[in-house]
Image: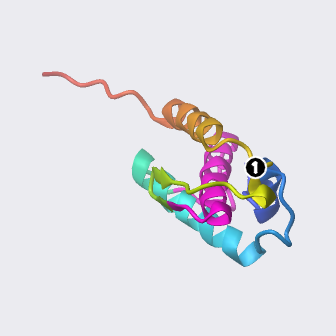
Amino acid sequence: MGSVSAEDVRDALNVKDSDISDAKVLKMIKRAEVTLELELSAGIDYQNCSEAQKEAITLLAAIYAVCYLTGGSAIGLNFSVGDLTNSTASLPSLAVLQAEFERVLSSLKEPYVGSV
């Protein structure tokens, strides 16, 4: 089982704790946890989760962090990012993070098999 830390999120973005505080990142991790719970209709604990859930939470929290660092906004799975500044130009592409998150999320979702 895995645990998502603020350092995991900062590592995904290659930023330091001086760029974004633990408290701020932990809020983003909690938001990502709740969003993932809603998407999967399952209870998830970011401090005790599967490796795939850890990856999804880390990626979504990283997306929230990119939005925060660039002055954009993020709600649920919808993202808006303004112009990047020189200090944040080295951040990973939001599109890359979002595509990776969507790939992980789709693998976590169980296929629905029902009858008509």
The majority secondary structure of the magenta stretch comes to helix
The location of residue 89, given as percent across then percent down, is 76, 50
| In the foreground, 68 or 38 | 68
Picture layout, residue 21 above or below residue 76:
below
Q: What residue type is labelled 1?
A: Leu
Q: Residue at x 67, y 54 (%)?
A: 84
- In the picture, measured across the screen, residue 113 lies left or right of residue 41, that is left
Image quarter where the C terminus lies is top left
Which class describes the residues within 10 Å of circle 1: few (<14), some (14-19), or many (20+)?
some
Q: Label 1: which residue?
A: 91
| In the foreground, 59 or 68 | 68
- In the picture, measured across the screen, residue 24 lies left or right of residue 75, that is right
| In the foreground, 17 or 83 | 83
Q: What element carries label 1?
A: loop
Q: Which residue is drawn at 64% across and 41% down?
A: 97
Picture layout, residue 116 above or below residue 27:
above
The location of residue 47, given as percent across then percent down, is 69, 62
Q: Is residue 51 magenta?
A: yes
Q: Which residue is drawn at 61% across and 52% down?
A: 63
Please state the extent of the stretch shown in magenta in the rendering: 44-73
Quarter assignment of residue 21: bottom right
The location of residue 16, given as percent across then percent down, is 87, 64
